[in-house]
Image (cartoon, coloured by chain):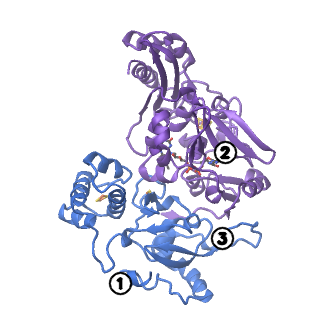
Amino acid sequence: MQKKFSSNRYDPQGAVRDDVSRRHFIKGVIACGTVAGAAGLMTGCSDSGDGGSAPAGSAERLISINVNGMSRNVDVMPNETLAHTLRNKLGLTGTKLGCDRGSCGACTVMIDGTTVNSCSILTHTVRNANVVTVEGVGGGNGELHPVQTAMIEELAPQCGYCTPGQVVSGVALLQRNPNPTREEVRHALAGNLCRCGAYNNYVNAIVKAAGSA
Amino acid sequence: MKDMMPNFNLVQPADLASAISTLADAGENGWAMAGGQDSLDWFKDRVKRPTTVVDLSGVPGLSGVTETADGGVEIGAMTTLTEVENNPIIKEKFGVLAMAAGRVASPQIRNQGTLGGNISQDARCWYYRSGLDCYRAGGNTCYADTPEGMNREHCLFGASRCVAVTPSDTAVAVTTLEAEMVIAGPGGERVVPASEYFIGPAIDITRMTVLEPGEVLTTIRIPGKWAGAQFSFEKVADRNTWDFALVNMACAMKISGGVIEDISLTCGAVECVPKRLTVVEDIVRGSAPNEETANLGAGAASRGASPLNYNHFKIPLMENLVRKAIRG
Ligand SMILES: Cc1cc2nc3c(=O)[nH]c(=O)nc-3n(C[C@H](O)[C@H](O)[C@H](O)COP(=O)(O)OP(=O)(O)OC[C@H]3O[C@@H](n4cnc5c(N)ncnc54)[C@H](O)[C@@H]3O)c2cc1C
Ligand code: SF4
Ligand code: FES
Ligand code: FES
């Protein structure tokens, strides 16, 4: 599995190797404050201790999650969103944060093939699922997905901030419906806000990709 | 700046009994989390600070749609809104619920949000949601019901200190379908009709449903009564996505021999609970579903409304939606 995505598209700092030890995790935790600080986030790392009083069934912090076909080991706090884990712990910063409240879709990722807002889901709830981010929609060697190619050809993005979310919503649509109507495309992209108002360009791109995907 | 939500203990039980006992032990400090689409916003805004969050997603048997002997369906509370929207049985027999589910929020939220969570979600009054110490939050004033209060989204009916409305699109549909809620708690199971599941401020100003701490909604049971009726669902909101209804309307009609043999009509976002329009139903039952009947019904729809400063527009809106539901 790891071979398939061994391209250098992944931040080597973020990719945790198989031989990872508990020490790496601890280093990761210490590092998380700095990385997150640089990204303008307060992580709440300091008050995340459970104080040893966790009831039975409490989530274990050291977990593996399956992201873009790779199993990634990561230390996840109980109150941590998937967007936070992806961006600040796994180095997958293609997923953007806009509102952090489920109201913009910039953080859209696929969980088992359906789109969700990764800002509004706890990482611990996707332990047994397959997560696909914008980094994982294309081929193994940096090849673009037809949706991405079509977005370039149609000059879909303006500032580009909403683009990763638009790509993921478009790819998810074509996976379940390879030949959508224009109306179905609009419906599928309805949860992706674009402050630049490039909506039509995005719809054009997905319609075009549908012909070639 | 974005920051993390305050910490809590996340418990992920693998069976219903331990979910209930964990919630019951935590009492007022516990929180049942389904899809989390309402829950996480409360935590991020630090308005609700539970110490124990129980994730119901690993509890088996809480999702899926099954047909029942009386021609109805049982829908697991954890069934996602997208599944409700696309389920062939629900679409065929109880289309109004599929339509309502399809109008909630955005595709991403419907993929994660559940039917149980959608009907059990808390009020969307922004004074309350921004953490002000209003009546609903246990304080002693209402910020929306003042001369300067921004109450365009608030209620026309049933005010009792609090003037918040039910924000849910599917609550209106399950009320119209006369659903029953199956609730499991430490003392066993109880079944509550939709007409009693949703509660207004006069009953308990701090809650929107009868759910007590420690209880889990397991199933939404739709009786066969309205299966295959003529359905409509209409929602008016400022934006098509992510936006709550200014007024929504769910209708089930049985037409026979050119007249309305029976009708169930429910209006949302005008009261703290979904408002079943029984007065309108009584007026139009037995008449043809035409313009004249629609006008008669519409004229009675807002009887008894007491608008606030900024929400008078909801009265004609409500009347028009009644008209549209009846004449098609
Ligand atoms: C940007 C945005 C836009 C939205 N727009 C709309 C809209 O247009 N229309 C609409 O209707 N809603 C809308 N919503 C609300 C959203 O649909 C609901 O928050 C969502 O459906 C809740 O489902 P959930 O499973 O995620 O619930 P959760 O957040 O997990 O739970 C919601 C509440 O219900 C309780 N609960 C949930 N399930 C159970 C259970 N089985 N037993 C006991 N208690 C339970 C929880 O304790 C919590 O109090 C919007 C939300 C957002 C963030
Ligand atoms: S309407 Fe209800 S929720 Fe809103 S401020 Fe008044 S008491 Fe609080
Ligand atoms: S950042 Fe997740 S929806 Fe806006
Ligand atoms: S391209 Fe700028 S937000 Fe969409």
Question: Which residue is most to the right?
Answer: B187
* Label 2: chain letter: B
Q: Colour of chain A?
A: blue
Q: Secondary structure at mark 2?
A: strand
Q: Is residue A170 visible?
A: yes
- Above or below, A24 relative to A166: below
Q: CA distance from mark 2 to mark 1?
A: 46 Å
Q: Is residue B302 visible?
A: no
- Which of pointers 2 and 3 indicates the residue nearer the eye? 2
Residue B270 screen position, x and y as percent: 53, 28
Instruction: Spot the purple chain and give its letter.
Output: B
| Dot 2 amino acid type | Leu
Q: Residues within 10 Å of mark 2 (few under 14, many from 20)?
A: many
| Residue at left offset 51%, top offset 71% | A85
- How many circles with numbers are drawn on the protein? 3
* Label 3: chain letter: A
Q: Are marks 1 and 3 on the same chain?
A: yes
- Above or below, A101 relative to B233: below
Tell me the residue that label 1 is attached to.
A7
| Residue at left offset 21%, top offset 66% | A152
Residue B224 screen position, x and y as percent: 58, 30
Q: Are marks 2 and 1 on the same chain?
A: no
Disc number for residue B217: 2
Task: Tell whether circle 2 marks a residue whose Cβ is less than 8 angstroms from ligand 1.
Answer: yes
Residue A9 screen position, x and y as percent: 35, 80
Q: Are marks 2 and 3 in contact (CB under 8 Å)?
A: no
Disc number for residue A47: 3
Q: CA distance from mark 1 to mark 3?
A: 37 Å
* Label 1: chain letter: A
